[in-house]
Amino acid sequence: MIYLDNSATTRPHPQVVETMKRAMESYYGNPSSLHQMGVEAETVLKQAREVAASYLGCKPGEVIFTSGGTESNNTAIKGVAFQYQNRGKHIITTQVEHPAVYDVCKQLEGLGFTTTYLPVDRDGRVSLEDVKKAMRPDTILVSVMYVNNELGTIQPVAEIGQWLKQFPKVLFHVDAVQAVGKIPLRLKDSGIDLLSVSAHKFYGPRGVGILYKREGLIIHPLLMGGGQEGGVRSGTENLPAIAGMAKAIRILSELGTGETARLEKLLQQLRQGISAIEGCRINTPASGTAPHIMNISVPGVKAEVLLHALEERGFLVSTKSACSSKANEPSRVLVSAGIDRDCALSSLRISLGRENTEEDIKSFLSALGECVSSLRTQMKVKA
Ligand SMILES: Cc1ncc(COP(=O)(O)O)c(C=O)c1O
């Protein structure tokens, strides 16, 4: 099987698995315990925090360990909303966020908050101008994702962050779950107050992530208890997963930008090959995207049918994002980008990763060509 669903999740690196095994066997003390086992576990935790901080370009105290992207997003958005509701109840986000942001805003609307969902252009990109227009005296939070998980579009997060600096009371949250390890992140002077990270998207374990919270910023904790993670996220830390994530981050740092360049080349190869297949349309913009996501449509062919035809030939891809792929409705993200319903219903996401090679792309393209041609012939016969 050739795995081309790396935006859904990635295969943990063998060294990550080894690190986690060692942490489970040797560091099972509770980091909050005062005895030697506790101190040893706390040291592992401290080292992991330093590794994460150095990668993100922030201070170790600004790293909060969570259970992943969903929790980081919920903690950031609800944490700000509940803490600062006396200042205002208006939130700005986009129409193309992951449900872990979009549905959180919807939920807050039920609690008396109002949300502006910014439109996007044909590339799935929001504009700073629209952020400016949406600003109100009662705005307390702007939440914009870094890289869109369906189209791969990079949002103008740097520009928005710079502009928002003149409103110190309006907080800026960024869902960077699809960005880590794919595009350079620099938190210092970015204007970003809160940023979400998830380890399983970069060859780390599932169920662990980071919420970066700018030093001095107070947010309402969602989980109360033992006061771990600076009181923002109570609960005994998942040390093996955190150690595994730190290992995955170390590997990212070692690989540097070479891997991004390699993925960009593979994505280009994919784009060229797909453009030559009759009946295929490319939804991912030609520039300004992350190097690992390619969204395509074969109008008239149901996405699941194509997905399973590819699976029979040994290729694993996905329809929409993995989290919402079971609902039989067109993707909110693609529809927001002006892609027609028919196209949106037939869209597939191919997402590349560290293990994919030029050879994989070549054989995938030939399988895709065969599947599309035979499914389109079947359609014509039926019609
Ligand atoms: C952009 C984005 N945000 C958040 C999440 C949720 O992350 P997690 O699976 O760690 O909860 C995902 C996962 O697909 C994502 O792509």
Image (cartoon, grey):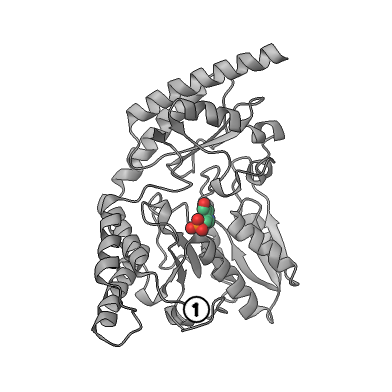
Picture quarter with the N terminus: top left
- Is the residue marked 1 within 8 Å of ligand 1, measured from its CB? no
State left or right for residue 323 relative to residue 43.
Answer: right
| Viewer-closest of 29 and 50 | 29
Residue at 31% across / 50% down in the picture? Answer: 13
Residue 56: quadrant of the picture:
bottom left
Relative to 166, residue 369 above or below: above
Residue 365: quadrant of the picture:
top left
Q: Tell me if I can see residue 146 in this picture.
A: no
Picture quarter with the C terminus: top right
Q: Which residue corresponds to mark 1?
A: 232
Q: Measuring from the top left, give residue 82's x and y in whole percent.
A: 64, 77
> Identity of the amino acid at label 1?
Val
Relative to 72, residue 283 above or below: above
State left or right for residue 192 relative to residue 10.
Answer: right
Q: Measuring from the top left, give residue 33's x and y in whole percent.
A: 33, 85
In the image as oriented, which residue stretches furthest toward the bottom? 34
Instruction: Name the element at disc 1.
Output: loop
